[in-house]
Image: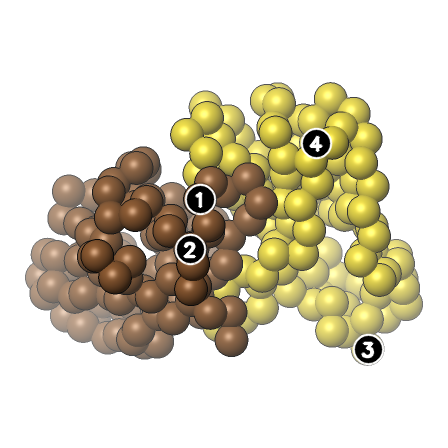
Chain colours: A brown, B yellow
Amino acid sequence: DSGVTQTPKHLITATGQRVTLRCSPRSGDLSVYWYQQSLDQGLQFLIQYYNGEERAKGNILERFSAQQFPDLHSELNLSSLELGDSALYFCASSVASANYGYTFGSGTRLTVV
Amino acid sequence: TQLLEQSPQFLSIQEGENLTVYCNSSSVFSSLQWYRQEPGEGPVLLVTVVTGGEVKKLKRLTFQFGDARKDSSLHITAAQPGDTGLYLCAGPDSSYKLIFGSGTRLLVRP
């Protein structure tokens, strides 16, 4: 157990639907990062939160949004889902900056049918 | 834009062989990290190298950071089936989030 908890582990949903992925960071970590991993794209950065505030944004689609709550857990919302959104979504956390590494959760596998 | 390129993309070797995986960039990084990812799991941090020329050892794994801090290598001695996985290098970009290389998939056959 890495200390970063992601739920659900698997999600199968239809095109056009909306889903919410949840992440609880490791105790003491203030930064939460979301990444998308697909077979041909590697780990692509989506968004970072630090202590409740958005800090950095990657190539995140407008259909996707995220937030970090006062208890530091984070949610990634994916809407108007398309087949191409099928991927592994990882949450990672760190104390502050990324200089000394992330702790990753075990991911959510999203399948859009 | 800072990019990390890894080579080779795929590696299939026999148990007991040695191998080296490379991570290269045209940009200078303040540090580089190596992760290993197994199927169905998130990447796990193996090591962080910070100083140019630094060498770190983790049992049969040896990590080196290039003198100019633009590249790194991972050498595995006497590979075992348990070393099988996806090896990722990563480094912090100008906004201090990690960017990842595309990874090297290693298969060690018994």
The type of residue carrying mark 3 is Pro
- Residue at figure coordinates x 73%, y 22% from the top left: B68
Q: Secondary structure at mark 1?
A: loop
Q: Assess disc 2: are there few (<14), some (14-19) or many (≥20) residues with their C-alpha within 10 Å of its C-alpha.
A: many
Q: Which mark is residue B71?
A: 4
Name the side, left or right, on which A65 lies relative to B47: left
- Mark 1 sits on what residue? A96
Chain hosting mark 1? A
The image shows residue A17 at horizontal and vertical percentages of 10, 65
Q: Real-space Cα distance between discs 3 and 4?
A: 31 Å
- Mark 3 sits on what residue? B110
Q: Real-space Cα distance between discs 1 and 3?
A: 41 Å
- Mark 2 sits on what residue? A29
- Residue at figure coordinates x 53%, y 30% from the top left: B3
Residue B33 in sight from this viewpoint: yes
- Which label lies toward us, 2 or 3? 2
The type of residue carrying mark 4 is Asp
The image shows residue B51 at horizontal and vertical percentages of 74, 31
- Residue at figure coordinates x 41%, y 30% from the top left: B95
Q: Secondary structure at mark 3?
A: loop
Q: Assess disc 3: are there few (<14), some (14-19) or many (≥20) residues with their C-alpha within 10 Å of its C-alpha.
A: few
- Residue at figure coordinates x 70%, y 67% from the top left: B84
Chain hosting mark 4? B
The type of residue carrying mark 2 is Asp
